[in-house]
Amino acid sequence: MNETNYSRVTEFVLLGLSSSKELQPFLFLIFSLLYLSILLGNFLIILTVTSDSRLHTPMYFLLANLSFIDICVASFATPKMLADFLVERKTISFEACLAQIFFVHLFTGGEMVLLVSMAYDRYVAICKPLHYMTIMSRRVCIILVIISWCVGFIHTTSQLAFTVNLPFCGPNQVDSFFCDLPLVTKLACIDTYVVSLLIVADSGFLSMSSFLLLVVSYTVILVTVRNRSSASMAKARSTLTAHITVVTLFFGPCIFIYVWPFSSYSVDKVLAVFYTIFTPILNPVIYTLRNKEVKAAMSKLRSRYLKPGQVSALIRNVLILETK
């Protein structure tokens, strides 16, 4: 009888996005293309920022780090999800499940703080332009990035501490495409009401405090530029529109899932797709297609490495090799 006090579950079954076998190949194709777009888009931003000296500024330094975190956010669960589309039984070991919980909170927690840092950068640039380079020095930017990773690590360690010692001895089906903390804790063999409250307090505090800081920052910026020229107001609104779009798409699902985890709605897995897939793919679009400097740097990068003659020569050489 005492054996029930110990964890007997060695693996979990992920129910995935859909139980329809007919949809699995279609979902595999769609999410494979999305994941490839995430990798290419964010790697392109990192390459562009690092290769063009004109983009060696605080804003683009933080943007490149955001792209790196977006790659991490998309990669902790998406490859496993793609592989599960091709198999009938979608299982994950207990250790791998805990690893997914660790990484999802590490990366998302770090991204929340990094988004706040980017909002602070825009506040300094718009409200205190004469002191911008002094306040947002290289050292300060590096410290902000380190703080984001440290906060993410502290957050995920505290979250994992709630789960690692829970006894799992019965049901092992997780109704999602990855091990999400609220769903996994419900499978424990003990009453997890108090644990769920601690999860809400931890995740809710980080999510809501970061979101409120962002709202305050954007409000102060808009109030500051309201009395300036229409050109300054238009530029500020354009910048803030991009930031607010990313913040809404990222924080909305996170707040819904982790601040109200007791809801019986089955939309949690759909919301999880937003901050693990759609936000990482939208960030390159929002921050680059609206930015003339980044587009100019990408054009310069393309002309340097993909000259018109090089592409045709490469195709010609491939065709010659195939005919031999």
Image (cartoon, rainbow, N blue to C red):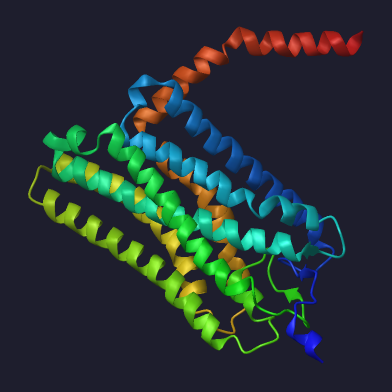
Q: Residue 43 at x, y = what percent?
A: 55, 34
Whether residue 289 is visible, yes or no, is no
**Quick one: which residue is furthest to the left in this view?**
227
Q: Is residue 181 left or right of residue 244?
A: right
Q: In percent of the image, x 66 and y 88: which residue is there?
A: 190
Does residue 265 appear to the left or right of 204 in the view shown?
Answer: right
Q: Which residue is pictured at 75% across the width and 77% down the height?
A: 7
In the image, residue 154 sits, relative to residue 289, either above or below, namely: below
Judging depth in this view, the residue of 138 and 302 nearest the camera is: 138
Q: In which quarter of the image is the C terminus?
A: top right
Residue 269: x, y in percent? 62, 69
**Among the 4 quarters of the image, the one containing residue 215:** bottom left
Residue 267 image offset from top left, x and y in percent = 59, 74
**Residue 190 visible, this angle:** yes
The quarter of the picture where the N terminus appears is: bottom right
Work out whether 22 lies above or below 309.
Answer: below
Q: Which residue lies furthest to the front in this view?
A: 2
Left or right side of 19 for 135: left
**Left or right of residue 211, residue 135 in this image:** left
Could you say which quadrant of the image residue 53 lies in?
top left
Q: Which residue lies furthest to the bottom in this view?
A: 1
| Residue plotted at (21% across, 59% down) | 219
Q: How many marks?
A: 0
Residue 245: quarter of image: bottom left
| Residue 289 in picture, x, y percent from top left | 43, 37
Q: Which of 96 and 114 is in front in this view?
A: 96
